[in-house]
Image (tube, rainbow, N blue to C red):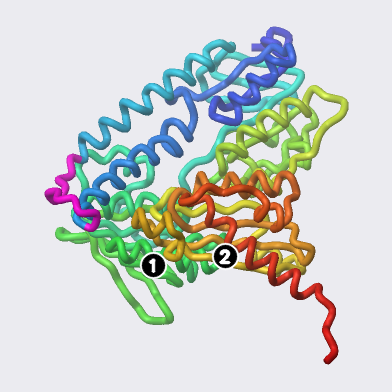
Amino acid sequence: MSEASATEYDLCIVGGGSAGYAGAVTARELGKSVVIVDGPGPLAGLCILRGCMPSKTLLRSAEVAQLVRQASEYGIIADTPRIDAKAVVERKRRIIKEFADYRIDGIETFAVVRDAARFVGPDLLEAGDRTISAERFLIATGSTIAVPDIPGLKKTGFVTSDDVLELESLPKSVVVLGGGPTACELAQYLSRLDVATTMVQRSRTLLSDEDEDIGRSLRGALERDGITVHAGTILTGVERNAQAKTVRFLRDREEMSVRADEIFVALGRNPNIDGLDLAAAGITYGEGIKVDEYLRTTNPRVYAAGDVLHESLQLVHVAVHEGMLAVCNAFSSQRKKIDYSLQSARAVFTEPQVAVAGLTERECIARGIDHAIASYPFDDLGKGIATGRTEGFVKMIAAPDGKILGVAIVGAEASDLIHEAIALLYFGANVRDVMEMPHLHPTLSEIMTYPAESLMERLDHEKRPLVTP
């Protein structure tokens, strides 16, 4: 098809996931014509189909199984739970279909082209036998599962998170390669469904992007759940025989190995840029697409958002925000810079959960930011003790004047509790503000008051002049 016969739109979005859909809705609100180009696979995006929602659905089933096991601790006599993995997955599919159908209905209110896309010029895109031109483009093709080049891995065979979400028949044992959010969540899921689970992690702590005390605390909880954790390892090879698959690794220069029925590779994701022919559009990229602070690529007509970005945070709420902001910037003469200081808030849905907002202790040290820290454990919190949810702690970081810089929580309902911290950070609150705010008792939320009180007393004391006898 010639350039003259190309279909023209104000905005062409490549990718119909969370970032792309948010961008499409935003563009329509601005009165722009939109086409979404998505591949031939299922519509709705990673979060709904193979990420956030299905994993949390499965995790709830695992949590219920664990509650049944612990029922006697609460004076309730229950039989040992019997796991029906097929029913667990069928429940997940039923719930996710409802989410997906709703999103697909929304996507299909736009012009949609279902074919692989590639750029053939700075303002031209080919999708199958169609050529599309647009005033602006938004690339939001997401990410794909990273499979490392470990000797013997591909020959031996393995499963990924996509596969784990669909397992109707569970292996008796599994080795999980990785210690990030996906590895931790699904390792606990498998363990609680009676799969003997071992984790082999390269870094010294789980969740290695977070402060070490978070990783240590979560590791202790997972080990108490029956999971074996090997951290600080170097993977050297994988092999199989008729009985099992074997993962070999070095730990403190000692050669070690773990055998299991299955290997679960959970070593991250890569930006999905294959086949886009970004060079034809003059777009600079590395491991992902490089953008400026306005989410604009090196081609001023093209913006990018979500997991496809170089050094993406890989958080769905961030992808949505980026998609909306990129489209606003694409059609505005007064563009707004992306600010991740609050958007980087995140959670891991293990039990105990992990949630972080604002600056971490590690970031404060790296940036030379003067700060004070106070922590408080859940095993000293009334609601935590009464409900038997005593794992973990809350950590608050404050500047010398008491301004809250960051909060980290390892504990029950951390993904919900962190929103108080997000609000405090949004309004630039001081630890004294926390003490003046009412917190109901007994609640999990009141744990926020204890590190705030400790910091307030400490900082006030440090401000007092010395008294000479």
Residue 57 x %, y %: 36, 37
Label 2: few (<14), some (14–19) or many (≥20) C-alpha neighbours in 10 Å: some
- The magenta segment is 73-84
Which percent across, then down, holds residue 84? 18, 40
Which badge, 2 or 1, comes first in the chain's sequence? 2
Is the residue under label 1 in contact with that under label 2 (CB below 8 Å)?
no
Do we see residue 171 in this rendering?
Answer: no
Residue 319 image position (x, y, % from top left) = 61, 36
Determine the residue located farthest toward the left in the rendered image.
Answer: 79
Residue 101 can be seen, yes or no: yes
Q: Amino acid at mark 2?
A: Asp
Q: Nearer the viewer, residue 14 or 422?
A: 422
Q: Which residue appears at 33% of the width and 54% of the height?
A: 188
Q: Secondary structure at mark 2?
A: loop
Farthest-out residue, front: 469
Question: Which quadrant of the view contains residue 28?
Answer: top right
The residue located at (42%, 64%) in the rendering is 379
- 294 sits to left or right of 126: right
Q: Which mark is residue 278?
A: none
Q: Which residue type carries mark 1?
A: Gly
Q: Which disc is residue 220 wearing?
A: 1
Q: Which residue occupies the foreground of this view, 219 or 13?
A: 219
User: Residue at (15%, 60%) from the top-left corner?
Assistant: 243
Q: Quadrant of the C terminus?
A: bottom right
Give left or right: position of 335 versus 422: right
Is 82 colored magenta in this rendering?
yes
Residue 296, given in percent of the width and then of the height, sits at 76, 35
Question: How far apart are the two marked residues, 2 and 1, measured between alpha carbons?
Answer: 15 Å
Q: Quadrant of residue 135?
A: top right
Q: Is residue 161 magenta?
A: no
- Quadrant for residue 334, please give it: top right
Disc 2 designates what residue? 211
